[in-house]
Image: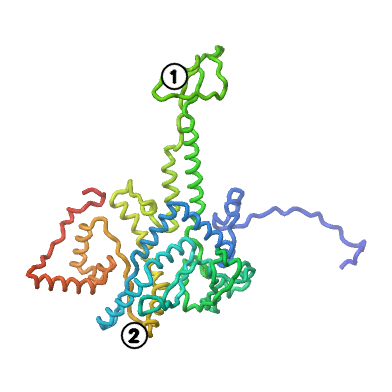
Amino acid sequence: MWPFGSRNRPPRKALTAVPARRAAAKYDAAQTTADNRRHWANADGLSATAAGSVAVRKTLRNRARYEVANNSYAAGIMATLANDVVGTGPRLQMGTASNDINRIRETLFASWAKAVGLAEKLRTMRLARAQDGEAFMLLTTNPDLRHSIKLFPVVIEADQIASPNLMQNLLQLSGDIVDGITFDSNGEPKTYTMLDKHPGAAAALISRTFTEIPAASMIHWFKKGRPGQRRGISELTPALPLFAQLRRYTLAVIGAAEAVADIAVVMKTTMPSGEEAAEVEPMTEIEYAARMATFMPEGWEPFQIKAEQPSTTYADFKKEILNEIARCIPMPYNVAVGNSAGYNYASGRLDKQAYYKFIRVDQSSAEAVVLDPLLRAFAEEASKVYAFIDKQYAWPHQWFWDGTEHVDPVKEAVAQSKRLESNTTTLATEYARNGKDWETELEQIARERKRMKALGLVPADVEPAEAGTGRSGDGQS
């Protein structure tokens, strides 16, 4: 040790610059270069809750709503998605040992679902899940409902599920409370804070009262893209910039075409260099009379500006960007735009296969998150009215959805017949493809045949047409 100011201190060594070392990365994508630095500037390590903060979700939600309200492609994609997933609504099939009990419960649920407009509310929920990122359904009762079971589901907009304290809503200091939803230690919802008035309503500026809803009375349906995600993000998020680009390019093309179309005729001189044409005041306008000969000033002749817009690549640009937009759903291009021009029969079917799988996954999610809790609440309410119905939720059941119609019904009938003959399928499976209950259908067939026999009619077994009568794989007859 040398004391402060000591003269015996050894001389200082000259400092040398240490060359900067690049981080050794095994993956090319982990390298940060001058070329990709700006591209990855917004990449962050935020948690799912922090990345989907109140402000971020509100901005995405409002922009998605704007696009769906003002863009016909966005509106059509959302409507098609809701119709394909929900259709005319799910149908309950019970699986107890007693067929009579099964039919009673199925009929009771079907009549209640029709009374509350369940199919329409499910379509609204699917639209909200895609557009807003999440959908909420409040399970309450309505004494004025024209049905013996007074359970009444109400679809709630995502804006109404929020913390009443604006500062807490913005900061989200506690991980146990995320924008109006309180979670337990296992990450499961305990209560939902529902604002009595929509934040966008005029009355919300005067009063911000709220109601605490227990988790058993609220259904929250959203797509979990990350572990730990507790609120939904609009499914249109990746496509929102693309919608803006499509609109800007379309408006630019229209504007350029209109600018050229607005100029009927332009005058140019035909005189060679050095010679003077008739003197004409610049920007002079000449009015043409229909079906009349008009003499131009000496040395001048009219010509029309050639329109360069829309260019031949305009249609290709729209097709590619719409294809990219629909991919985040995921939905094939011909379904998204409602146009299969250029598709043959095989291509049209092939592109829809992945979409149909997505629909089945979506329906499975709806069953687990929405329909099963709804059936549980229905059973509890029904047991209060009917003594023969127990309130236990453990009803063996399954849900049926609308089937998908085949493009070539003759070919599908032949394939179905062969599957049944080879025992590679069952009647239950084949009827389920069309959203039908096989027991109900067979009972109906038996009643029809019995009635036909009573009327002296003999039901004929119609053989399916030969496979060659349908269209071939390339779309040719």
Task: Say if 331 sits above or below 106 in the image.
Answer: above
Residue at 19% across, 64% down? 417
Q: Indicate which disc residue 97 carries.
A: none
Q: Amino acid at mark 2?
A: Tyr
Task: Say if 272 sits above or below 144 in the image.
Answer: above
Viewer can see residue 476: yes
Secondary structure under the numbered disc 2 in the rendered image: loop
Q: Tell me the quarter of the image containing the N terminus.
A: bottom right
Left or right relative to 475: residue 56: right
In the picture, residue 185 is in which quadrant? bottom right
Marks 1/2: CA–CA distance: 91 Å
Left or right relative to 131: residue 444: left
Residue 347, horizontal then vertical, whole percent: 31, 51
Find disc 1 in the rendering and name its residue. Answer: 294
Residue that sits furthest to the bottom in the current view: 387
Secondary structure under the numbered disc 1 in the rendered image: loop
Residue 315, horizontal then vertical, whole percent: 41, 42
Q: Amino acid at mark 1?
A: Thr
Residue at 45% across, 29% down? 306
Q: Could you say which is closer to the camera, residue 185 or residue 138?
A: 138
Residue 123, horizontal then vertical, whole percent: 40, 65
Residue 163, horizontal then vertical, whole percent: 58, 71
Left or right relative to 288: residue 345: left
Precedes in sequence: disc 1 or disc 2: 1
Q: Look at the image and name its color scheme.
A: rainbow
Q: Indicate which disc residue 386 carries.
A: 2
